[in-house]
Image: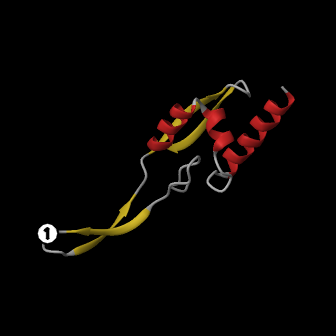
């Protein structure tokens, strides 16, 4: 399982920890990923996703999973989230 947020696409980054004496040691910066169950109002079911804590705040700010996925660009989403987005758009188009 990749260390990547399914909604925002955040992944691990590499860089240096720089000491006071300017020594550089390589390090890996990992996103704060959380396994969550989010409710989709349009589909009427819950969905399990692995998202970053920052994405969780954004989902809350935009008004839920459905609103977040409608606004999200397809390039950031995982394959599972893309299918979820298509299902929500189909459901909203028929309603």
Q: Which quarter of the image is occupied by the C terminus?
A: top right
> Height in image: 87 above or below 74?
above
Q: Which quarter of the image is occupied by the N terminus?
A: bottom right
Q: Is 16 displayed left or right of 78 in the figure?
A: left
Residue 53, image quadrant: top left
Give how far across and how far down residue 66 sits, in percent: 66, 33
Outermost residue, left side: 21
What's the residue at 86%, 29% (across, down)? 94
Mark 1 packing: few (<14 Cα in 10 Å), some, or many (20+)? few
What's the residue at 79%, 31% (across, down)? 92
Frontmost residue, 80 versus 64: 64
Q: Could you say whether the residue bearing mark 1 is in a helix, strand or loop?
A: loop
Give how far across and how far down residue 9 sits, in percent: 56, 54
Residue 91, image quadrant: top right
Give how far across and how far down residue 48 sits, in percent: 60, 36
What's the residue at 18%, 75% (across, down)? 22
Q: How is the image coloured?
A: secondary structure
Q: Is 24 displayed left or right of 1 in the figure?
A: left
Give how far across and how far down residue 63 sits, in percent: 58, 29
> Height in image: 47 above or below 9?
above
| Circle count | 1
Kindly identify which residue carries mark 1.
20
């Amino acid at each position: 399982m990749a260390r990547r947020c399914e909604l925002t696409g955040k992944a691990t980054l590499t860089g240096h920890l720089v000491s006071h004496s300017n020594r550089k040691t390589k390090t890996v910066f990992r996103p704060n990923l959380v396994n969550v169950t989010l409710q989709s109002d349009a589909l009427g079911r819950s969905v399990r996703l692995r998202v970053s804590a920052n994405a969780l705040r954004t989902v809350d700010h935009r008004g839920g999973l459905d609103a977040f996925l409608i606004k999200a660009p397809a390039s950031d989403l995982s394959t599972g989230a893309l299918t979820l987005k298509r299902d929500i758009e189909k459901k909203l188009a028929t309603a």
